[in-house]
Image (cartoon, rainbow, N blue to C red):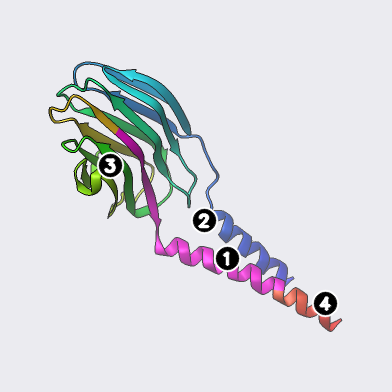
Amino acid sequence: MKKSIFLLVTLIALVGVVPAALANPLTLKISNGAGTAVTVTGNDLIVWAGSVGNFDFNVTIGAQGVPGDDFMHLSSLNISSANASSDPLTIEFTAENLTTPTDSFQMAIGGVLSPAGATGTYQAFYNSTLIGLIGFDGTTNSGAFNYNFNGAGPGSTPYSLTQKITLNANGASQLSFSGGATLNPVPEPSIIVLMGSGLFGLVFVGYRRSKAMWSA
């Protein structure tokens, strides 16, 4: 009887810290700053390819992952223009009604930007509060980069998350970017302890059962 109660409590603890995967409203906005913009909406996954002004997007994928995996990511983000304007190109990806508790996020971006004079920034927000900002350019390491930054989280739920990438040709006639950006929640210590306790309980019950079998 005691073993059954202990196992039930352990399972409840595990279920409590592993939320079910629910659909989250997503919005992808792309603008070239000159009045030309595209907005795409969906749930959990957005796939879009096309043109915005003089910029061509080969494949743009925005997805909201599951807790413990990439929480948000813009992957396979490939952009090119043979006639880039002086206006900045902005890509925004927003996920709403998120409920994974966290006090901090890790944001990361990597890829290749050209030509040498081009610059870019990656910003992340929870609700309307800035988590952090990462700058990159087409000069350092021949335009190849890989940066990350840890910033504060909301501390309460629900909340929305937004990734914003801004690219500037800075007078160059061409612009090319290939890369991706992620935004991951850093689990709260209490959740890690609770999950660890639940897993330990399952291991302990398994050990007791194995011992009883060998003793019989």
Residue linked to disc 4:
213
Residue 2 seen in this snapshot:
no
- Give x and y (percent) for residue 209: 76, 74
Quarter of the image with the C terminus is bottom right
Residue 13 image-quadrant placement: bottom right
Q: Secondary structure at mark 1?
A: helix
Residue linked to disc 1:
198
Q: Secondary structure at mark 2?
A: helix
**Amino acid type assigned to the residue bearing label 3 in the image:** Phe
Residue 40 image-quadrant placement: top left
**Amino acid type assigned to the residue bearing label 4 in the image:** Met
Highlighted range, magenta: 177-206
Residue linked to disc 2:
17
- Give x and y (percent) for residue 42: 45, 26
| 86 lies left or right of 214 | left
| 125 lies left or right of 8 | left
- Closer to the camera: disc 3 or disc 2? 3
Q: Residue at x 48, y 32 (%)?
A: 45
Mark pair 3, 4: CA separation? 54 Å
Task: Name the N-terminal-most of marks 3 and 2.
Answer: 2
**Residue that sits furthest to the left in the current view:** 171
- Closer to the camera: disc 3 or disc 1? 3
**Amino acid type assigned to the residue bearing label 1 in the image:** Gly
Q: Residue at x 82, y 80 (%)?
A: 214
Q: Residue at x 58, y 54 (%)?
A: 15
